[in-house]
Amino acid sequence: MGLLILGGALVAAMPLSAANPAFFVPVVVGDVQISWFMVAGLIMLGAIALSQSLDWNRIRVGAGVAMLAGAAGFAVVYVCQVAMSAMLHHLSLSPERLMVMAMATVLLFPFWISFEWLVRRGGLTISTVQASLGRILILVLMAVGVSLNVLPFVLMLLMPILTIAFVMIEIFSASAYSASRNLIVIAVFETLWFAWMIAAASPITFMF
């Protein structure tokens, strides 16, 4: 059911994202990506709220610590990746791109927390399989969106990079789930990584 809701939200978000509601994020192509995931995330949150009785008090308990843990995990990955080679060093963030990443993080978080809530359930093996299928579904529907001219064609060129990134993100996510079962830690990590990719790789349209 979680995968069905995920797929349905991504499909439903395609025509809505064509209006580019994240137009104010000053990057080319990246704003369309953000729009698609932002709209899909809001649809998924709505579906979760309508279909399940959420214990918001339980979710809030420890949320601050979980967010710090997810951010710390991403910080370690960021430093290691950027320092790995001269090519990856170009993915370091200028002040402008850091601002774009902050904006993208806020807009993308609803999608990734909904993604985790819907697909990462049960034991380690089944939760990892379901989350991996969810990531594959994202890539497949991204290709469908490009074929329908709803999403920009350049996303097809980024597909190998996204695939590798999803594999690395899932390695962290499965480890974090095995250790803590804390979905907020995973969602924060995923959101920051995805926002970093968009901010670092997309052409930026302003400078301070």
Image (spheres, rainbow, N blue to C red):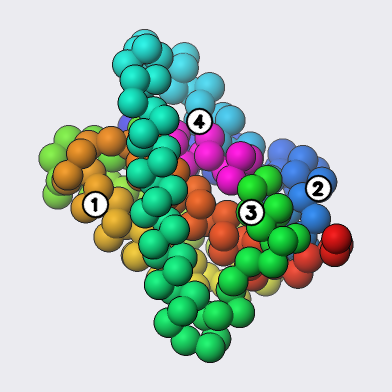
Q: Would residue 71 appear left or right of 175 to someone viewing this image? A: right
The span picked out in magenta is 104-114
Q: Earlier in the sequence, mark 3 or mark 1?
A: 3
Residue at mark 3 to residue at mark 2: CA–CA distance: 14 Å
Position of residue 202 relative to residue 53, above or below, is: below
Q: Residue at x 77, y 40 (%)?
A: 21
Residue at mark 4 to residue at mark 1: CA–CA distance: 22 Å
Q: Tell me the mark number nearer the camera, choosing from 4 and 1.
A: 1
Placement of the C terminus among the 4 image quadrants = bottom right
Q: Could you say whether the residue bearing mark 3 is in a helix, strand or loop? A: helix
Q: Is residue 159 in view?
A: yes
Residue at mark 4 to residue at mark 2: CA–CA distance: 21 Å
Q: Could you say whether the residue bearing mark 1 is in a helix, strand or loop? A: helix
Q: Tell me the mark number nearer the camera, choosing from 3 and 1.
A: 3
Amino acid, disc 2: Phe
Q: Would residue 100 appear left or right of 112 to someone viewing this image? A: right
Amino acid, disc 3: Met
Tag on residue 44? 4
Q: Earlier in the sequence, mark 4 or mark 1?
A: 4
Are the residues tagged 3 and 2 within 8 Å (C-beta)? no
Residue closest to the eye, 208 or 162 = 208
Q: Residue at x 57, y 64 (%)?
A: 197
Are the residues tagged 4 and 1 within 8 Å (C-beta)? no
The x and y percentages for residue 58 are 32, 16
Can residue 109 be found in the magenta stretch? yes
Amino acid, disc 4: Met
Residue denoted by label 1: 174
Residue at mark 3 to residue at mark 1: CA–CA distance: 24 Å
Q: Residue furthest bottom?
A: 86
Position of residue 195 relative to residue 187, above or below, is: below
Amino acid, disc 1: Ala
